[in-house]
Amino acid sequence: MKFDVLIKNGLLYDGTGGQGFRADLGICRDRIEAIGDLSGSTGSSVIDAAGRIVCPGFIDTHSHSGILALCKPDTPHNVMQGITTCVVGQDAMGAAPMVDGFVGPWKKAMAGLEGSYDLDWSWRSTADYLDRLDAMDLGPNFAYLAPHGNIRMSVMGLDNRKPTPEELERMKVLLRECLDQGAFGMSTGMIYPPCSFADTEEFIELGRVLEQNDALFVTHQRSEADAILSSMDEIIRIGRESGCRIHFSHFKVAGRKNWGLFDAVLAKLDECTRQGIRVSVDQYPYVAGSTTLSVILPPWAHDGGTDRMIERLADPEARKRMTADIEKGIPGWDNFVDFAGLDGIFVTFVKTAKNQWTVGKSLVEIGREMGKDPLEATYDLLLEEEGTAGLVDFYGLEEHVVRILQRPEQNVCTDGIMGGKPHPRVYGTYPRVLGKYVREGALDMATAIRKMTGKPASVLGFADRGVLKEGFAADIVVFDPETVRDTADYAEPIRFPEGIEHVIVNGKAVVANGKHVPVKAGKVIRFSGRN
């Protein structure tokens, strides 16, 4: 038989968690046509995978490439580590839905997570945005979550208040429209406005819409630090009362003083299982996180959106109040300065050329070089950058990374935020799991591959991806199990991994012999409702 692509002599791990088996794999157009002994067959392109592992393409359930892909659609940082599908629209902040009058403020609000790009933002609906994305020369596939922040803003602006019954009903209608137009669920970022302004009942009502469609409730919960137990209780209640599936983003326990809560946190996941609540989590395999620099400011500083935050940063009295709240804390607020320390928070990117010197430096170092208190120096930086700046924060414990990695609810993600000097997870997450955690014995190969392929596919509800199976989409990775490893670190994060030799998206090579191939291969994968 003649195939478009024939992969010979490989050790196949099919993504289900089963052990590897020797077989050939044939691809016709964008589908896996045959798996087995294909020794009499030929291919227009032939890959000899002797000594290599062949597995499904990796699915990143938490990506921040949704705006970047409109400018650099091949996203080599994704495909070079084996990612064939990116799930975007995370943390309650995405491209759509959008309404007139809020494009400018929303672009500023999103810049710390998604970056700042010169785009016209002419789309308004989720369908418009996904069509725009689908028209790009995508390297990987993309799937979308409807961001709660966009939905809330579209109905009631950026106000810090409860919705009226009529407004809540409009939000539910808008969420249904997003699902009908292809979103796989709804994301929340409960530390980011305006999502942070919503109460539990608002999420329960929206969760009922998700349950009706068997769509996913994805959450950056209110606290991953001091109040993590009560925060998890809120999410569990949302799952229990709405009936929807719940998925914790970038699962962790942040801050040395909270590490003692870790066993109780895992017990909450066990509680979900006992209650019959469908729960999953994703995790990046590092002890540091990354987000927008403005997250160090207390919640009230964000009321009214980024423009109001900038006004407060210019007000000396407001700054005094910010500093007092950061130093004393606010119950229920994840205080990044408290759990990471000023010396454990580093700037990853800024917008202006003037302040590029701050990239890679801690807040203590920036304060020292500016001759100011570190917080005052950070306020100045945020003011000059109009909030467009990112951070890396060191909060975690390696033992916790391993124990979460081993949980049955877990799948791998990058939470990859681009920038001048980004978190190394942007370039190294998946090879790090294979090169560090598999080789060191924390996971066996079959389990690790399932956590990067079949498990996230089942969590999201992908019908024909994440598993090597005849008739399924030809999203495939070929890697060397002896040499695969991440090379990106905090000092030099912009470095591609080693050992990822071939990556195929919908039957087309986007990585060949370890080299990036810019080609239109990916597409937008759209949710089709309850199966």
Image (cartoon, helix red, strand yellow):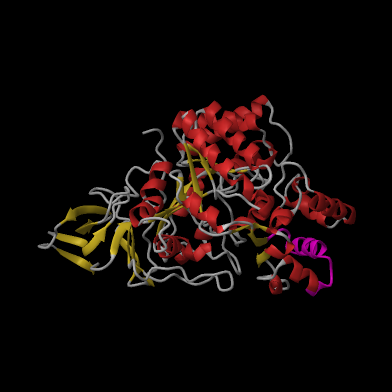
Q: Is residue 458 left or right of residue 155?
A: left
Q: Is residue 323 above or below residue 43?
A: above
- Is-magenta flag for residue 384? yes
> Can the viewer see residue 302 in this picture?
yes
Q: Quadrant of residue 489?
A: bottom right
- Residue drawn at x 56%, y 63% is 418
Instruction: Report the span colored magenta.
Output: 369-388
Find residue 527 and report its horizontal and vertical position in percent: 42, 41
Q: Main secondary structure of the magenta part?
A: helix
- Is-magenta flag for residue 459? no
Find residue 286 and report its horizontal and vertical position in percent: 54, 60
Find residue 239 and report its horizontal and vertical position in percent: 53, 32
Q: Is residue 287 left or right of residue 225?
A: left
Quarter placement of the C terminus: top left
- Residue drawn at x 68%, y 55% is 108
Q: Is residue 399 above or below residue 150?
A: below
Instruction: Count how many numbered circles sit on residues in the image.
Output: 0
- Residue drawn at x 65%, y 41% is 195
- As drawn, the residue found furthest toward the left would be 40
- Residue drawn at x 46%, y 71% is 496
Find residue 417 and report its horizontal and vertical position in percent: 57, 59
Seen from the viewer's position, the closer of residues 511 and 378 is 378
Seen from the viewer's position, the closer of residues 104 and 217 is 217
